[in-house]
Amino acid sequence: MLMTPGLAFFYGGMVRAKSVLNMLMMSFISLGVVTVLWVLYGYSLTFGNDLGGGLLGGFDFVNLNNIVGTLVGVAPTDAAAPWVDGHQIPHVVFVVFQLMFAIITAALISGAIADRAKFWSWTIFIAFWVTIVYFPVAHWVFNFNGVTGTDFVGGWIANKLGALDFAGGTAVHINAGAAALALVLVLGKRKGWPREPMRPHNLPFVLLGAGLLWFGWYGFNAGSALGAGDLAGVAFLTTTAATAAAILGWLIVEQIRDGKPTTLGAASGAIAGLVAITPACGFVNPLGALAIGLVAGVLCALAVSLKFKLGYDDSLDVVGVHLVGGLTGTILIGLFATTSVNSAGKEGLFYGGGLELLGKQAAAAGAVMAYSFVATLIIAFIIQKTIGFRVSAEAEATGIDEAEHAESGYEFSSLRSGGTTSAKHAEHTAEKVSATAAAGKEG
């Protein structure tokens, strides 16, 4: 749960001062909307007994009925499941754990449309998006046969295709990244982009948010083992290794390309590494994790510049980090997976497994990306044409915080005194500094 406020700070620091509250709220509202829908029907559509074809769960757990006093994680017959050693946890704990994945996946999308989305339109979008996109896709990826019911059938990616995704590279990051691209195309560019500089207003916020995300990610990845044993330890270790390597990869690209390593680059590199290792953390060894992290750091650092070449305004690089990072980690499982760390996994190409797993990983990534992109495009287009999705040009220019929330993140009144404008105040301050410097020289 801590990851979502962490994401709010990460995104909030990257926007301009006049948009920070709106950016924070776009993450926080996901906690409200997704939780309510999860209780009513979201968990059931995700982890209920399949309705057919591995596409959607049934209505077994509507209103969270039939979960108290039961266990999940009983060893299923499908060897692709990550908890085949028989981990069992209370069903109610599993419900809340999986809820957090749903919450942050929706919140991740918001960074792509910073500075220009109506708050209530975004809220309505979240409700439709998790219902039509996230719940089905999570069913495909996370619902293994027999996990929430001994005779229950799960999703097609987990059980029929047999692609590997330990903690959400497809269901979370590719899903959110593809949706972000679709939203950007519907809402269009920010006013003045890319001519006007739109620099982060608070880099300490960005680093704080990245740190909170990194901390929470251990629950995200290691927790997906559904038990405190070797497998959770492997995920804990590989998550750390990949993230560290990604920071170095991103900063090296910045040094070569721009001449300076930046704090924004370090934070972004960390997130890129976390994204990429998410699907692979329980299936690769530490060396594989270092390779995945390094590749992700380099590729994501290069990918964020594509928006300037291709002309799509992905405000906070959701496409460049989450879509590209998610694709990187998901596909590289096909190279680096090894059963030496998880007997429920498979051997990748570099461990004698051939191309079969690589093909399955690519198929899973492609299916999720295509479905999420098309479905999001339709949802966003309908909202835009009915209630409107984008704020007015005036609201965008003066500040979305005031326009949408009647608040501002910072109090600037100290720049005004007795009718003196901020410009005069700055001029007066400069004169005092100059006088002090002159006095120092005379002394």
Image (cartoon, grey):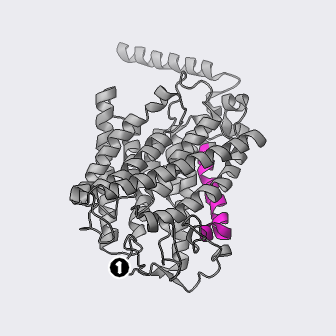
Q: Is residue 406 visible?
A: no
Of residues 407 and 44, the one nearer the viewer is 44
Residue 69 is drawn in which quadrant? bottom right
Residue at image point 66% right, 64% down: 37
Where 311 sits versus 372, above or below? above
Where 68 sits versus 381, above or below? below
Which residues, given as a range, are shown in magenta?
23-45
Provide the residue designation for mark 1: 85
Residue 26 shown in magenta:
yes
Quadrant of the frame with the C terminus: top left
* Left/right of residue 258 with respect to residue 352 in the rendered view: right
Residue 406 shown in magenta:
no
Q: Residue furthest right?
A: 386
Regarding mark 1 in the picture, which secondary structure is present there? loop
Q: Residue furthest bottom?
A: 69
Where 64 sits versus 301, above or below? below
Report the predominant secondary structure element of the magenta stretch: helix
Residue 393 on image: x %, y %: 71, 28
| Disc 1: CA contacts within 10 A as few (<14), some (14-19) or many (>=20) | some
Residue 181 on image: x %, y %: 55, 40
